[in-house]
Amino acid sequence: MSKNEEKNIQDIINHLKVSGFVYQNSEIYGGLINTWDYGPLSTNMMTAIKKYWVREFISREGNYQIDSKIIMNPKIWKASGHIDNFADYLIENKVNQKRYRADHIVKDLFPEINVEKATFEELENIIKEKVKQYDNEKCEWTSIRPFNLMFKTQMGAIDSTAAQTYLRPETAQGIFVNFKNVSRTTRAKLPFGIGQIGKSFRNEITPRDFIFRTREFEQMELEFFCEPEDSEKFYYYWIDKCKKFVELLGLKNSNIRIRPHEKEELSHYSLGTSDIEYLFPFGWGELLGIANRGNYDLSQHMKYSQESLEYLKDDGSKIIPFVIEPSIGLDRLLLALLIDAYEVEKLEKDDERIVLKTDYNISPYQLAVFPLVKKLEEPAKNIYDKLLKTTDIRVIYDKTGSIGKRYRRQDAIGTPFAITVDFQTLEDQTVTIRNRDTMEQERISVDEVEKYLEKFVK
Ligand code: GAP
């Protein structure tokens, strides 16, 4: 097993593009910078990951899931603080008119400086005094200015600022503004959570590192409402739950760490935040975050909407609940899972194979069915059809090329098992089943395939 520091991110990206996990967005028109589409393989994986999130964060916890809109009343973003605070520090090189995130430049060139703690004046001084060349170009810097990350759009046919709205930069606010609706219609008692999965948009100054930081991405967020005095307990509960969740999906423990935020780097709403970081080949990076948002959001929405969002306790007293928020970026999690799974293995006779050792439960396909030779296509296809129609196994049929080539193709896209239909199958209804990781084969009855694979279901 190779270590992540030794993995080459460019090799992994090339592999993901060539094998159909990720496509260049708008490719036939020359693409759209730093924007990617997901092919069937990634989409299968993401569907499986979302299913596990719903199970672990919603159903098994007795929480509620909703689906609010991407475009909402713009007053929401004033109340949430996004209009005033949701900005990165933008600096421009006057020589080539390129724009950069000031903290990224300092992080790249002076890794010993803790950019999270640096003020905007400090960043500006460091860059103006010390950075004479960047991105292979001479530099003359403008001053730093805050750049709001929300995408603006217009609602309806009126082209005026009155019609200006935003694409949501997080799914969380759709939950806060529905808090009253959900608690009234479900009659839920504290503590309880409301979660949702959906797209979020941020006009990042420098999207980078492939699908790690993009302008459109998907979030899986839970807002867990509780009594203020219980918030510390639930903060640690959800940190632990998130760690177990990414391990359940197959991330190696040695590539994960929990990093509590220092006071200076807390978001405007947060009383405490911890990130779960992943060791990407380009260094440790935030995979997901857990924040204690206190009662900031509900209080702000009460103030701006003039509606009460208080919770009535059984003893007749009213409180504004505190909120613990585990927030997971699906695209980033997918990238981490693919990097974790990627191996280039040396085989006999100077041969090697690329293999994605994805967990069975989130693999794009879980089983491949091959006919050994052309003559056996019909019985193999019949077995494939039956598995498709009568089981939940994600199964793929492949008849092209030698068996060796077909194994390699499935290894490269992470299919953990492959069954081959041969002449013996016609006599005794058995097939060989080959394990992607060990490459070992055994013979089992066709009727036992589903039961055989059940052992791997988590
Ligand atoms: N509601 C809280 C919130 O949105 P965040 O730390 O800004 O917190 C949560 O985002 C998660 O969303 C991150 O940990 C990351 O996984 C993902 N995320 C944020 N910005 C992203 C981007 N530009 N591209 C991909 N994923 C992103």
Image (cartoon, rainbow, N blue to C red):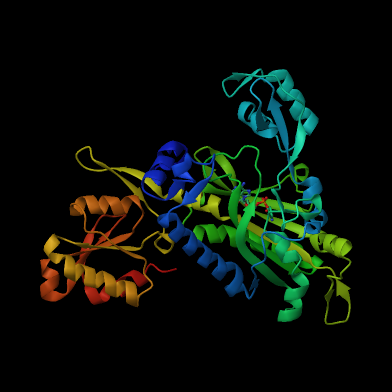
Residue 244, image x, y percentages:
55, 61
Using the image, determine if residue 171 lies above or below residue 308.
above
- Viewer-nearest residue: 246 or 152: 152
> What residue lies at 49% left-to-right and 41% top-to-bottom?
31
Give the image quarter of residue 11: top left
> What residue lies at 67% left-to-right and 20% top-to-bottom?
131
- Viewer-nearest residue: 2 or 360: 360
Tell me: 47 left or right of 351.
right
> What residue lies at 41% left-to-right and 46% top-to-bottom?
16
Using the image, determine if residue 27 lies above or below residue 51.
above
Residue 111, image x, y percentages:
63, 30
> What residue lies at 70% left-to-right and 27% top-to-bottom?
92
Give the image quarter of residue 148: top right
Residue 128, image x, y percentages:
73, 21
Can residue 190 be seen from the camera position used here? no
Name the quadrant of the N terminus.
top left
Using the image, determine if residue 457 lies above or below residue 185.
above
- Viewer-nearest residue: 344 or 37: 37
Name the quadrant of the C terminus.
bottom left
